[in-house]
Image (cartoon, grey):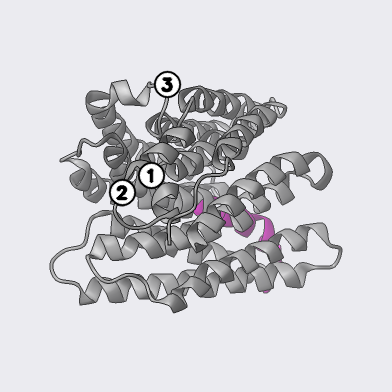
Amino acid sequence: MLLPALVFLALAAFLAAVLGIPLAGRAAGAHLALAAGAMPLIFAAMSHFIPVLTRTRAAPAALAGVPLLGATGGALAVAAIGLPDALWAQHAGALFALVAASALLIWSRLRRAGMLGRPHACLAWYEAALACLIVALLAILASAVWPAQTLALRRLHLHLNTLGFIGMTALGTLAVLLPTVIGRPDPEAATHLRRGLPWAAGGTVLVAAGAAWFAPLAALGAAAWAVPLARMGHAWQRRYRAELFAAHGAAPLLGAAFMGLVVSLLLGAAAVVVPTLNPLAAFVAGFLFPLVSGAATQLLPVWLRPGVQDAWHAALRGRLGRHAGLRALSFGLAGVLAGTGYAWALWLAAAALAWFLAHAGIPHERHPS
């Protein structure tokens, strides 16, 4: 039950981040959503999907400690912002998360080495995402011994974390998850992932380095990221257009997450010349919120009751996806408005997320023993 618990923890952290911004500030809200909410959930989801991608046995029970280490690191990162003279907590949190990410990457490489045949192309995206997170966390630790570069290292950390760790994990997962949700495979998905990885990884490095030290590099990085996004977007609109614009189901939310990533990337590139833009707000409201709620719509029934899919799973999935098209529209609108400076739009995203949580919290019958 770890995965369902982390889904609800992440969603609660997202809501708390939006509600707490007026009191605690934007930095605390960002760390609450990204470090305490998204990171542990991604660790747990990777632990679930890596055996599938490598066609190996399920993750060992000891690996459950990885998302718990990540959650501890995220909590310490939030505490470091809220407490005076708590810089030690920031470095301790980075160290906890670094151990967790490194353990997960090493385990993934071992699974890759021990499998028969080639792994799914999504695995390389997961490993590149973990590598980005590891470098991002090392940047925070490096600021303790390189204080003159603290601001630049924090910018490097932010972009390697958001666009690298979360963005690359998400796009790799979306390429597999959306066809599964719709029930029609995308025969080009693996090819798009293999060809797109160098562009996304290189683009992430350029964006992060540009944000930290030399702004023109960020525009080149955004252009590089546009290559895999354009390929995937074109394939999706040809194959899945009707489902992406449906009134119900997980597909509209996953489509909104994809567009939210595109919008936040564009705003990030434009922020070089228009500093009033807020690409991080667009990333959280327009990308992260629909991504997690859309993935949970499809996967939460499986995680709550593993095994053969039956009417119970279909009913819960139908309830979670009810009116998802309207929520997807709300997230998209909130992302654009919040990203262009209208901070009140985050409340629109929070309301849509609370609506999803209301559906998810409706009691349902227990699994028969």
| Of 218 and 369, the residue lying toward us | 369
Q: Furthest residue to the front?
A: 369
Is residue 272 visible from the viewing direction of this image?
A: no
Residue at figure coordinates x 22%, y 27% from the top left: 239
Badges 2 and 1: C-beta atoms under 8 Å apart? yes
N-term-proximal mark, 2 vs 3: 3
Disc 2 to disc 1, C-alpha distance: 6 Å
Q: Where residue 16 sits: x, y (%)?
A: 71, 45
SS at mark 2 in the image: loop
Is residue 135 visible from the viewing direction of this image?
A: yes
Q: Where residue 72 sits: x, y (%)?
A: 64, 68
Answer with the quarter of the image where residue 311 lies: top left
Identified by mark 3, the residue type is Ala
Q: Which residue is mark 1?
A: 313
N-term-proximal mark, 3 vs 1: 3
Residue at figure coordinates x 59%, y 43% from the top left: 361
Badges 3 and 1: C-beta atoms under 8 Å apart? no
> In the image, is residue 145 part of the stretch drawn in magenta?
yes
Q: Which residue is mark 3?
A: 247
Kindly report which numbered mark, 2 or 3, lies closer to the viewer in this rendering: 2
Q: Which residue is mark 2?
A: 309
Answer with the quarter of the image where residue 351 lies: top right
Q: Which residues are magenta?
A: 144-160
